[in-house]
Image (cartoon, rainbow, N blue to C red):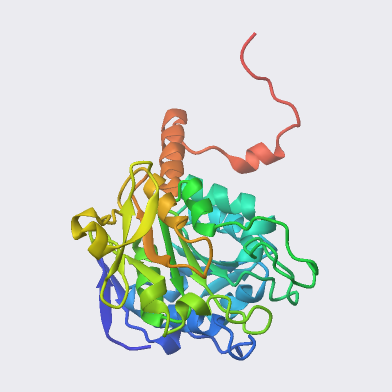
Amino acid sequence: MADTATTNGAVPVPLTTRKDWTSDQEVRWCPGCGDYSILAAVQMLLPDLGVRRENTVFVSGIGCAARFPYYMSTYGMHSIHGRAPAIATGLASSRPDLDVWVITGDGDSLSIGGNHLIHALRRNINITILLFNNQIYGLTKGQYSPTSEVAKVTKSTPFGSLEQPFNPLSLALGAEATFVARTHDMDRKHMMETFRRAHEHRGASFVEIYQNCNVFNDAAFEGITGKDHRAEMLIPLEHGQPIRFGADGEHGVVLRSDGTVHIVDVAEVGEDQILVHDAHRDNPGLAFQLSRLSRGPFEPTPIGVFRDVERPEYGTQMSDQMAAAEARRGGKGDLAALLRSGSTWTVGAG
């Protein structure tokens, strides 16, 4: 760790490098797994955020992605299946001084953990959630997941999945998440910038990462994230800019009178008809429409920040409420006395 210090407000923060944030544990993912690039992006970003390792916590559930805390030289917890958002909620609410990250996968947080995820988002807990979406259960060797496409043939669906998959971004927006974004494991620069903005956001940040499982679902996103396809298949969302894509920006997105969004050729409709992206729009309806623009990773797909709005953060509100209650009581309650008291109480008078 470098001796020089920078500042985060009035508090000196030692300068660090990626090495300082990297643990001594052997990284154990399959060779070629997209998790490696996500890990590298996070480790390279953290030195630039002006935060302390001892104030940083990574919480994970179960799955390949859940090994993440072992590889970070920070505090961390490898919790149980689907419960990472719940554990992170308690931690972030009780320790607002900490930077709390949740590392999860599509199988972990959208199946058994779905309820915990949506409530962490709707409460606006001050946590940064990174959801690795590879559309498969990788750790348990290739069963279909909540994001697997219809007709997906796997070990658990030999005749093809019958279920409509979750759209993680639509789910997050429906839960009123205040920060919602998408990136992919083939673009480190885009990942780092997306993670940076998610971390800077005060409240619940949700980032979906298209992540390749090269063993059980290889090339699931190749049709849109491959270098030869990105210009025509990835639609960059930049606040305040017209939504255009293509090698020469020849394609664009328009908002129709029925409230739906559609892809058009700019030359045919005119530049003034192209939708200007507004990530700060309070109503999530338009962001929701953008999240539904693609039916899957085989059509032009938006990436970037879909929504970034301000709303009171749960932990701060909880602390203020407790302080107000203590002021009315004239001091803090005695938890030890309550625990040692009898099993009955008299409520009210007379």
Is residue 77 among what the camera can see?
A: yes
Residue 4, position as x, y percentages in the image? 27, 85
Residue 67, position as x, y percentages in the image? 62, 77
- Residue, x 45% and y 54% (percent of image)? 204
Give residue 232's quadrant in the image.
bottom left
239 sits left or right of 218 in the view: left
Closer to us: 104 or 168: 168
Give residue 334's quadrant in the image.
top right
Closer to us: 199 or 223: 223
215 sits left or right of 290 in the view: right
Is residue 73 among what the camera can see?
A: no
Residue 215, position as x, y percentages in the image? 67, 84
Where's the N terminus, which quadrant? bottom left
Number of marks:
0
152 sits left or right of 328 in the view: right
Residue lying farthest to the front in this orientation? 268
- Residue, x 63% and y 53% (percent of image)? 114
Where's the C terminus, which quadrant? top right
Give residue 285's quadrant in the image.
top left
Residue 298, position as x, y percentages in the image? 52, 70
Closer to us: 100 or 66: 66
